[in-house]
Amino acid sequence: MKNRIGILFALLAAVSLFLIACSKTEDSSKFANEAAQGGMAEVEMGRLAVAHATNPEVKQFGQRMVDDHIRANTEFMQLAGRKNMQLPREVSSEQKERMDKLSKRSGADFDKAYVDAMVEDHENDVKEFEEQSKNGTDADIKQFAAKTLPTLKQHLEMIRAIKSKM
């Protein structure tokens, strides 16, 4: 009887470890999908800033988003290709809606809305990339997150500085 209970506990422990491993894999997949969509959204919103912003610093920041995120997106897509991962090819419907609303603004109203969105986005991105760089289960995605994190932190510092002047 004791032997059966021991076997049962060992089996339960193995199943638990398997479920934990699967959930972490799903988290890496979720991170990859969200990072891909977020990167594409940053590029599109940066293009909006270049076209619509009146504040020169906001325009420059928008161009920086386009340049930096295109570079990161390209690297991430190449990584995904090597791993045979299917990533989204367009932004989410929520991101599209957000960009639509932003594109209808102009002048200082646009600048403020864009800056607020970029502060919020980059605060979230920094948290997510830090988490993935520390606790990611896929070594390549973990390394990409760690490599990209300093640039995201720099973006956050830049946009906070712009916001403080507005």
Image (cartoon, rainbow, N blue to C red):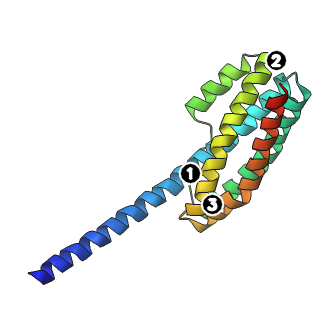
The quarter of the displayed image where residue 50 is located: top right
Label 1 near label 2: C-beta < 8 Å? no
Whether residue 80 is visible: yes
In the rendered view, would you say 13 is above or below 110?
below
Q: Say left or right for 30 vs 95.
A: left
The quarter of the displayed image where residue 46 is located: top right
> Which residue is identified by label 1?
31
Percent of width and height locating residue 113: 72, 23
Percent of width and height locating residue 144: 68, 60
The quarter of the displayed image where residue 57 is located: top right
Q: Nearer the viewer, residue 89 or 95?
A: 95
Depth check, mark 2 against mark 1: the one in front is: 2
Inspect the image, locate mark 3, and give the three-letter code of the amino acid beneath it: Ser
Q: Residue at x 71, y 54 (%)?
A: 149
Label 2 near label 3: C-beta < 8 Å? no
Inspect the image, locate mark 2, and give the three-letter code of the amino acid beneath it: Ala
Q: First in sequence: mark 2 or mark 1? A: 1
Q: Say left or right for 128 vs 106.
A: left
Depth check, mark 1 against mark 3: the one in front is: 3
Percent of width and height locating residue 143: 66, 64
In the rendered view, would you say 100 is above or below 120?
above
How far apart, in angstroms, are the residues tagged by discs 1 and 3? 11 Å
> Which residue is identified by label 2?
108
Q: Residues within 10 Å of mark 3 (few under 14, many from 20)?
A: many
> Which residue is identified by label 3?
133
How far apart, in angstroms, are the residues tagged by discs 3 and 2? 36 Å
Q: Nearer the viewer, residue 73 or 106?
A: 106
Q: Say left or right for 43 vs 80.
A: right
